[in-house]
């Protein structure tokens, strides 16, 4: 009987040791790599004029945070939402849907929605509908970005004025030495058009243009974009600061690591807040 009791106690001790290890899906860090609470981050976000949320497009933790941050801030302040996932020439129908002027089937047929819209972005649009917030389609229509990819910025000069209203004011500023664009040039290795970084820049410039065009004093503008568009305080933010340097911008990025309890050195400094997600996290596509 004593042997059985000892065996049971030993099993329980071993089981407790195994299962007492914490399983963490994510952690939040500041730019210096210091672990911070979500409460600390949310309180700081309340002081922003414009927030750039850099996501992984297929990461459920990114999308969960996007909704929770937006909902929280909507209970404290007036907010405006905007996203790379909607192209500027779809603004009219996006606004009509949010205002209840068209139903979902009409919205689905009229707006060019990303394949993962239902799982990853519909909740943000529904939140805007619920609270009466504006939702801004900030991205350049892809056909114009394709024109730049093929023939450079000059390809946009011949567009009629009616179509130029969907793009940042021309000519746009462009710095090929900016890290995000220089990195793209280095990655091409001669296998892609030298205009590829310019196509990225016209997207960044256009998103910045529509963010500022629709920003209202006394509101917090929360913008959702791929992390590459705002990491290292470049991309969209570079264009925003050129035009409105005195606004308070806060950036958020998403990274993936084997362990989330300590931020890798390579991920430090890429944003004001870094959401570090476990590599084993499932993806939405």
Image (tube, rainbow, N blue to C red):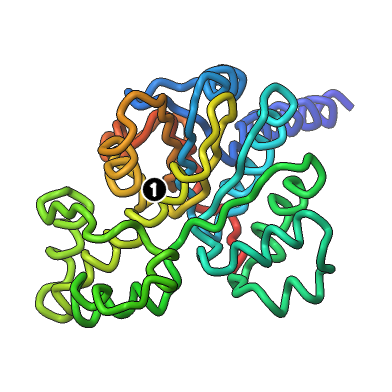
Q: Quadrant of the C terminus?
A: bottom right
Q: Position of residue 222 (x, y in %)?
A: 55, 39
Looking at the image, residue 204 lies above or below residue 149: above
Instruction: Tell me which residue sits at (68%, 67%) in the image.
Output: 93
Q: Residue furthest front?
A: 161
Instruction: Tell me which residue sits at (39%, 26%) in the image.
Output: 247
Could you say which quadrant of the image residue 253 lies in?
Answer: top left
Looking at the image, residue 279 lies above or below residue 266: below
Could you say which quadrant of the image residue 157 lies in?
Answer: bottom left
Q: Is residue 13 left or right of residue 164?
A: right
Q: Position of residue 188 (x, y in %)?
A: 16, 72
Q: Residue furthest right?
A: 1
Q: Is residue 10 left or right of residue 17?
A: right
Q: Position of residue 10 (x, y in %)?
A: 72, 28
Q: Is residue 30 left or right of residue 100?
A: left
Q: Position of residue 154 (x, y in %)?
A: 18, 74
> Within 10 angstroms of label 1, few (less than 14), some, or many (20 or more) residues?
many
Task: Count up the numbered dots.
Answer: 1
Could you say which quadrant of the image residue 4 lies in?
Answer: top right
Instruction: Tell me which residue sits at (30%, 29%) in the image.
Output: 245
Q: Quadrant of the N terminus?
A: top right
Looking at the image, residue 217 lies above or below residue 111: above
SS assignment at label 1: helix
Instruction: Tell me which residue sits at (49%, 50%) in the image.
Output: 55
| Front position in the image: 109 or 40 | 109
| Front position in the image: 255 or 142 | 142
Q: Which residue in the structure is indicated by mark 1? A: 208
């Amino acid at each position: 009987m004593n042997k059985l009791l000892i065996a049971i106690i030993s099993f329980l001790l071993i089981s407790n040791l195994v299962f007492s290890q914490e399983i963490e899906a994510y952690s939040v860090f500041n730019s210096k790599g210091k672990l911070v609470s979500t409460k600390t981050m949310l309180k700081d976000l309340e002081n922003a004029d414009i927030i750039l949320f850099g996501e992984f497009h297929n990461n459920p933790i990114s999308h969960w945070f996007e909704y929770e941050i937006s909902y929280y801030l909507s209970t404290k302040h007036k907010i405006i939402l905007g996203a790379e996932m909607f192209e500027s020439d779809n603004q009219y129908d996006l606004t009509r849907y949010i205002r209840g002027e068209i139903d979902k089937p009409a919205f689905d047929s009229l707006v060019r929605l990303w394949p993962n819209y239902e799982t990853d972005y519909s909740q943000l649009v529904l939140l805007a509908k619920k609270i009466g917030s504006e939702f801004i389609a900030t991205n350049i229509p892809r056909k114009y970005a394709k024109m730049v990819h093929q023939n450079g910025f000059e390809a946009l000069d011949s567009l009629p004025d009616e179509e130029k209203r969907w793009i940042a004011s021309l000519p746009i500023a462009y710095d090929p030495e900016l890290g995000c664009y220089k990195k793209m040039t280095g990655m091409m290795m001669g296998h892609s058009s030298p205009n590829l970084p310019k196509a990225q820049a016209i997207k960044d410039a256009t998103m910045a243009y529509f963010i500022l065009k629709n920003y209202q004093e006394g509101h917090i503008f929360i913008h959702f974009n791929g992390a590459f568009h705002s990491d290292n305080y470049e991309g969209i933010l570079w264009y925003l600061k050129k035009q409105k340097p005195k606004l308070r911008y806060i950036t958020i990025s998403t990274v993936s690591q084997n362990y989330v309890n300590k931020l890798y050195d390579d991920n430090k400094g890429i944003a004001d807040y870094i959401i570090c997600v476990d590599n084993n996290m499932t993806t939405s596509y």
